[in-house]
Image: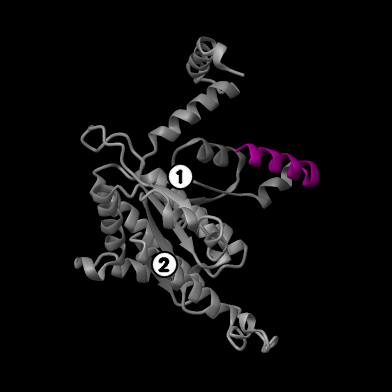
Amino acid sequence: MSQFMIVHDRLRRSLGKSSVKDHIVITTDPKKGFLREFANQEGYQTLDIPPGVGGRFSVLSAVGLLPLAVTGVNVVELLKGAAAASEVSTLPTLARNPAYLFAVLTYLLKQLKKRSTLVFMPYADALTGIADWFNQLWAESLGKRYSTKGKVVFAGQTPVKAIGTTDQHSQLQLYMEGPEDKVVVFVGLKSYRVDIRIPAVFKEHEGLSYLSGQTLGELIQTEQLATAQALAQAARPNMTLTLNRITAASMGYLMYLLEVATMAAGYLYQIDPLDQPGVEMSKNYTYGLMGRPGFESYKAEFNKTLRSKKKYIV
């Protein structure tokens, strides 16, 4: 909202107040909420968000589709990929349902083997954003203090983003020989959108010449396979999700699959994967400290705590 206020002010000063609404589309609830009321009063164009769809699950709704379409992504293909994933993600046979299998394996590793950290490691720089999104999806959905029955459970795994091959050199040492509390999930590709063949140079140097004639794509794929094998040899559990290549359809497939896996994991942990009470508390303190009406008690409580711990603050 702070960013919107800044952009709105700059648009108004550049275009005039009457033209601002021609340059803004608001995605919000179809009937209720502050933004819906604001959009109706100001006359902004709107796209509806299906009620009950939280932010981290909203990428395949208007929240994600509008900015993706504006930046040139084929959202029709994206949704086709998601639809294809919905077919396999509803299969009743566990071995044939990759979403349920993902949920069951990670759950069992956490509960039985104390693998409390999930490393999500795609082998493509273009999937960095997907890794960031998955981190929020997995952490915010599954990290819960209470079960659906009100029992204290402290559920969830801590997700960590790693990008192959870069983080083979910055994180892998820890995963190979550090605490036995991790499971690594690779995302591999059968082919890359752009590939470069390594030229046949330095033939007289055995330490280099063996790469000649192969491609960078083959090298990256081999490094991913080698890393998985090394982890397995060290008795460190890992799994691989393999995509044919990066396309709008494959991204829709992957995101839908991971959303279903997250929901299924929530069922196994017996927690609500759709709420985020811990996040709401920090928001309320922020509102109070920033002066939002109705949240004065949070500011007062914060200041009281601050005074009581004053001697410990440097």
Q: Up-down: is 66 above or below 76?
A: above
> At label 1, which amino acid type do we have?
Asp
Q: Is residue 261 visible?
A: yes
Q: Up-down: is 148 above or below 263?
A: above
Q: Mark 2 vs mark 1: which is more N-terminal?
A: 1
- Image quadrant occupied by the N terminus: top right
Q: Position of residue 217 (x, y in %)?
A: 55, 78
Residue named by callout 2:
230
Residue named by callout 1:
29
Q: Is residue 281 magenta?
A: no
Q: Up-down: is 190 above or below 126?
A: below
Magenta region = 1-16
Disc 2 secondary structure class: helix
> At label 2, which amino acid type do we have?
Ala
Instruction: From the viewer's perspective, tell me whether residue 2 is left or right of residue 254.
Output: right
Quick one: 96 or 159, which is closer to the camera? Answer: 159
Instruction: From the viewer's perspective, tell me whether residue 47 is left or right of residue 205.
Output: left
Q: Is residue 12 magenta?
A: yes
Instruction: From the viewer's perspective, tell me whether residue 269 is left or right of residue 135.
Output: left
Q: Position of residue 205 (x, y in %)?
A: 66, 84
Q: Position of residue 32 (x, y in %)?
A: 44, 38
Instruction: From the viewer's perspective, tell me whether residue 135 is left or right of residue 44.
Output: left
Q: Residue at x 73, y 48 (%)?
A: 19
Q: Is residue 50 visible?
A: no
Q: Residue at x 57, y 67 (%)?
A: 73
Q: Residue at x 49, y 58 (%)?
A: 172
Q: CA distance from mark 2 to mark 1?
A: 48 Å
Q: Up-down: is 271 above or below 161?
A: above
